[in-house]
Amino acid sequence: MNTGSEVMATLFIQGRQLQQWRLVGNTLSVRMHRRAEQLFPLSRLRRVIFIERAPGDMRYLWKLLEMGVGVTFLGSRGRLIGAFSAPAVESSPLPLLAERLMHDSSLRQWLAEWQDNQNRHLERDVLLQLGQQAEHFRHPLSDDARDWLDGLSGALLNDVAAEYQLDSAQRPARCLITTLHRMLLPWIMVQGRWWLRHRPAPDVQHCCQAFEAFSEPLEDHMQRMLVQLELRAEEWL
């Protein structure tokens, strides 16, 4: 179970180790097996991710959402089971863009060209890191680690996309989110290899810790892409 050091943090909770969770005023109280109670102010939480097992008592879920804290459930090997997000506040043109991409071939052609530019930007980052730290990339990522990093990054992207009113339950939005996720995956896996370089057989906790270490620059990439799409969408729509 970890949180980031930023003001708005994500809390990872290993469901199999969870003994009790409850809300005390505007504070989330979590007790894990063989660990002391930990307190997390809701004002500093952006999202809570339950991993591999949901808590038995769900009566506090409503309060979390009411306070603007999203909740995600990940199953084995990072599979997304479901997610609840606080509603986006500002209006965004991206849902309409996602809808039009399903039917407008000229818009899809523009998106493909935009993807090429974004991929070159991400590839430069990857090549720079590989060139500077090649000696540290001796061990490839295990299949389990790749699955967890895939699942965790997908959950983060769904959360960020929800701020732009992209609902992953809707097919047009889901297709656009999937496109962005696939673009980011090579960069994500290089970061994972770096942060897991001393753990040839990482478990889920190690993967969460590694993901947390690079989640801030990853979110910066996600925000940058979505903002660029918003600006271009306003020209097209």
Image: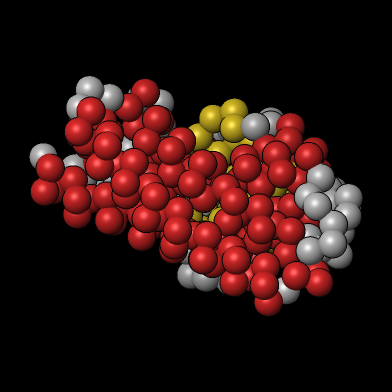
In this picture, residue 169 sits left or right of residue 203: left
Picture residue at 32% right of the left edge, 49% below the top: 114
* Residue 111 can be seen, yes or no: yes
In this picture, residue 2 sits left or right of residue 108: right
In this picture, residue 26 sits left or right of residue 5: left
Picture residue at 71% right of the left edge, 44% below the top: 146
Instruction: Point out residue 34 in the picture as x, y percentages from the top left corner.
Output: 88, 53
Answer with the quarter of the image where residue 97 lies: top left
* Residue 70 can be seen, yes or no: no
How many numbered discs sit on the rendered protein? 0
In this picture, residue 2 sits left or right of residue 97: right
Name the one closer to the observer, 144 or 48. Answer: 144
- Vertically, is 30 above or below 75? below
Instruction: Point out residue 123 in the picture as x, y percentages from the top left corner.
Output: 52, 60
Q: How is the image coloured?
A: secondary structure
Instruction: Point out residue 222 in the picture as x, y percentages from the top left corner.
Output: 42, 55
Q: Quadrant of the N terminus?
A: bottom right
- Return the residue found at the far bottom: 132
Name the one closer to the observer, 79 or 100. Answer: 100
Picture residue at 37% right of the left edge, 36% below the top: 176
Instruction: Point out residue 182 in the picture as x, y percentages from the top left corner.
Output: 51, 41
Q: Quadrant of the C terminus?
A: top left
